[in-house]
């Protein structure tokens, strides 16, 4: 398989590459080992700034001492309300080095959500990114009596602010430098006092089924899982990674910050979520982890570019991707690839496919990792046809991230792989619910012992809420969420995620929610891809004045109907979608219909658009 991708740097690395039984102990060991080498890079005002391990350590030490100067005690909680930046990591490691508990808050959360999360976590110090995030806190701080101090990363626009509760990050660092002179060794004492069993971080669930719940993770669980990650998706100090998903989400916290801390892989921070496509081409990561929406967006971009290409270019692409698909199919089924086909694949790479990879920014990628939501198997096959293995992992906040993963030498699109070596995974014999057990499983939900007891049974098995099947090789496949399975009026069991994934493979569809429980037939609510549909409208002289009028245009309705017809051909008649409607509001993460990770909340969407749904059945 080496002609398609090199497995030598993907194989599991079971040995411990960095000692330390708590996150701060591991960090300070990393500083001692890697001091002058670069760990993080962040683009500011068009220029990439590098942070060596020593520079990172200096900032973490000053912030940690600054916290202690403010009276921050061991086991107290500090929260970070910010986009994914270097400062997020500095604050996180400083809180842990001060013996505290670190919690993240989504930057898209509204003021009342910030209030709830600060109250529930018992936050005493809150780091905020800028004036926009500060405004949210100031709006609700009268309801947060435990909050002592608000630390602002970026003071632009706040230089005239005179508020005794607010301090800039630079001022906190200066306070820390002064404190360190008179309290030398205090931070080291706190780091040494951290015990593996102590609570380290809180990660709040996205709240799709009610108020967010604070999942508690110990230092032991974090360190154990980080070690385990290297047996699943190995990295080393030569790797370049992108850090752009929310750090308050378990995926980037574990797979980005802590895993790179452990392995020494470089972390590159994007300018902002909108510049990801541009930044990925600059960074050209060797390992790239993203959610399906990102992979779908890249694919859509290529398809739209292809439509504008010449006939010769389109023909060349069709020939090259066809060769890639034939090779990938043989590799996935374990069959030998004839020498003539290998030669044609190399030629296809040279003439076409490598250019497609450069267009996306994955031309240096050893492998891609996808997780956090289901992905279309066809999309996995497409990236494989480009010559880049895409490894799907599955896990959740409560399992500290990945619990299963596709091995690079046995890729099965549509599967989430076998259980990772560091935990057990099985199916409940009665319900087929996926259960997980291992030291990576969380300590429980903060302040919610009843919810914890509902989730982790007496034998230590975590009930995930995902329903699945397993094949003879022990590879799992998720069929749906237990709460999402549709049973039609005719008694047919439907797994909506399969239909939804096929629809999201379209460059014109961002998200979809299939409806049909206790109904005579299936319908779907669709959120269009604004950029691609607008371009379609412009290219085809479709008049529209705003987003709502775009969704109502007959030509756009016909475009989406064609995409639904394409998907329907893959399913039996009783599983086909009969009607649809397009959301006519442009949604962002601030809207209640979307989770912070940009997934439509099925239950809320069905409630909010009940009238439109009923109209599809009238």
Image (cartoon, helix red, strand yellow):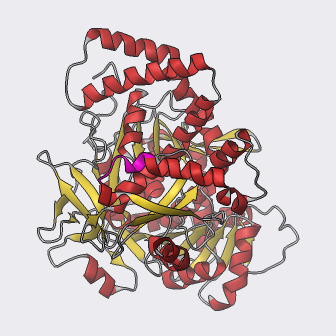
Q: Is residue 372 visible?
A: no
- Pick whichever, 355 or 205, lies toward us: 355
Indicate whether residue 567 is drawn in magenta: yes
Looking at the rendered image, the quarter that the N terminus falls into is top left
Query: Which span is picked out in magenta?
Result: 566-572
Q: Position of residue 453 (x, y in %)?
A: 26, 83
The vertical placement of 566 against 521, above or below, is above
Q: Position of residue 240 (x, y in %)?
A: 50, 36
- Tell whether 128 sits left or right of 102: right
Q: How many marks?
A: 0
Q: Is residue 411 visible?
A: yes
Q: Position of residue 414 (x, y in %)?
A: 30, 47
The vertical placement of 129 against 145, above or below, is above
Residue in view at x 68 percent, y 62 percent = 173
- Pick whichever, 607 or 269, lies toward us: 607
- Pick whichever, 57 or 381, lies toward us: 381
Residue at the far front: name it.
618
- Tell whether 601 sits left or right of 424: right
């Amino acid at each position: 398989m080496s002609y398609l991708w090199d497995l030598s740097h993907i194989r599991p690395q079971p040995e411990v590459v960095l000692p330390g039984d708590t996150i701060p102990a591991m960090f300070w060991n990393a500083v001692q080992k890697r001091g002058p080498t670069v760990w993080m890079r962040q683009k500011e005002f068009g220029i990439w700034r590098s942070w060596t391990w020593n520079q990172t350590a200096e900032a973490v030490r000053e912030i940690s001492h600054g916290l202690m100067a403010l009276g921050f005690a061991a086991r107290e909680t500090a929260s970070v309300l910010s986009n994914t930046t270097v400062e997020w990591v500095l604050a996180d490691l400083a809180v842990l080095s001060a013996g505290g508990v670190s919690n993240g808050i989504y930057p898209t959360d509204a003021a009342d959500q910030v209030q709830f999360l600060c109250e529930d976590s018992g936050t005493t110090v809150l780091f905020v990114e800028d004036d926009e995030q500060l405004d949210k806190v100031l709006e609700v701080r009268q309801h947060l009596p435990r909050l002592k101090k608000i630390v602002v990363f970026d003071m632009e626009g706040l230089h005239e602010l005179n508020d005794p509760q607010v301090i800039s990050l630079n001022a906190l660092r200066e306070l820390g430098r002064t404190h360190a002179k008179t309290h030398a060794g205090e931070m080291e004492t706190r780091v040494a006092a951290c015990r593996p069993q102590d609570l380290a971080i809180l990660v709040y669930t996205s709240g799709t089924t009610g108020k967010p719940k604070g999942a508690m993770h110990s230092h032991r669980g974090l360190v154990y899982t980080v070690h385990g990650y290297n047996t699943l998706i190995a990295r080393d100090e030569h790797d370049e990674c992108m850090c752009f998903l929310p750090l308050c989400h378990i995926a980037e916290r574990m797979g980005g910050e802590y895993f790179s801390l452990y392995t020494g892989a470089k972390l590159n921070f994007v300018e902002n979520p909108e510049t990801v496509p541009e930044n990925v081409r600059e960074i050209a990561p060797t390992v790239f982890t993203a959610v399906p929406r990102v992979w779908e967006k890249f694919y859509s971009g290529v398809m739209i570019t292809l439509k504008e290409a010449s006939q010769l270019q389109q023909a060349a692409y069709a020939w090259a991707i066809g060769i890639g698909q034939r090779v990938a199919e043989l590799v996935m089924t374990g069959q030998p690839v004839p020498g003539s086909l290998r030669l044609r694949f190399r030629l296809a790479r040279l003439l076409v496919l490598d250019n497609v990879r450069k267009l996306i920014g994955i031309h240096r990628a050893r492998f891609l990792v996808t997780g956090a939501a289901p992905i279309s198997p066809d999309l996995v096959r497409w990236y494989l046809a480009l010559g880049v293995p895409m490894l799907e992992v599955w896990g959740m906040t409560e399992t500290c991230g990945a619990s299963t993963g596709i091995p690079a030498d046995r890729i099965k699109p549509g599967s989430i792989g076998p259980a990772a070596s560091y935990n057990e995974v099985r199916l409940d014999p009665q319900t087929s619910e996926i259960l997980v057990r291992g030291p990576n499983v969380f300590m429980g939900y903060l302040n919610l012992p009843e919810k914890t007891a509902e989730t982790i049974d007496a034998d230590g098995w975590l009930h995930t809420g995902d329903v699945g099947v397993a094949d003879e090789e022990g590879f799992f496949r998720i069929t749906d969420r237990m709460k999402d399975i549709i049973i039609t009026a005719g008694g047919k069991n439907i797994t909506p995620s399969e239909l939804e994934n096929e629809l999201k493979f379209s460059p014109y569809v961002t998200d979809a929610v299939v409806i049909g429980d206790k109904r005579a037939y299936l319908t779907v609510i669709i959120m269009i891809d604004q950029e691609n549909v607008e371009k379609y409208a412009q290219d085809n002289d479709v008049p529209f004045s705003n987003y709502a009028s775009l969704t109502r245009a007959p030509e756009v309705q016909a475009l989406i109907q064609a995409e639904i017809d394409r998907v329907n051909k893959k399913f039996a008649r009783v599983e086909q979608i009969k009607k649809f409607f397009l959301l006519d509001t442009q949604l962002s993460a601030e809207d209640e219909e979307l989770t912070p990770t940009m997934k439509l909340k099925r239950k809320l969407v069905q409630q909010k658009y009940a009238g439109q749904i009923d109209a599809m059945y009238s």
